[in-house]
Image (cartoon, helix red, strand yellow):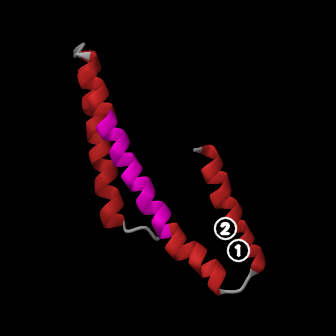
Amino acid sequence: MRADRKKVEPLLRTARGQLDGVLKMIECDRYCMDIVTQLQAVESLVHKAQREVLHAHLSGCVQEAFETGDEQAREKKIDEIIKLLDRS
């Protein structure tokens, strides 16, 4: 993975910790809106990690495919991104 692990790993570890906290909140029957707020925080962290990985992919793998002049590699990378966008 070419993404900056120093950026991605802390985001995901924090999200995991917050998600564990959400599970405890549910077990303790905490107020629904407090749980939703914490879930939004988890979602935000995961989204930031996702953007970081995607940025690394675009500036690394995709850029490399375009620089090599390999048309098949370029088409494959473009198709991957289109499929990713279709899923969101």
Q: Is residue 73 magenta?
A: no
User: On the image, which quarter does residue 50 sit in?
Assistant: bottom left
Whether residue 1 is visible: no
Say left or right for 79 vs 10. Answer: right
Query: Which span of residues is magenta-colored?
Result: 40-56
Q: Which mark is residue 77?
A: 2
Say left or right for 11 vs 78. Answer: left
Inspect the image, locate mark 2, and give the three-letter code of the amino acid beneath it: Lys
Whether residue 52 is visible: yes
Q: Main secondary structure of the magenta part?
A: helix
Q: Secondary structure at mark 1?
A: helix
- Residue 20 spot, x, y in % from top left: 28, 33
- Along the viewing direction, whichever of 31 and 18 lies nearer the viewer: 31
Which residue corresponds to mark 1?
74
Tell me whether the residue at label 1 lies in contact with that at label 2, contact meaning CB atoms closer than 8 angstroms: yes
Query: How busy is the neighbourhood of tag 2: few (under 14 within 10 Å), some, or many (20 plus)?
Result: some
User: On the image, which quarter does residue 62 sit in?
Assistant: bottom right
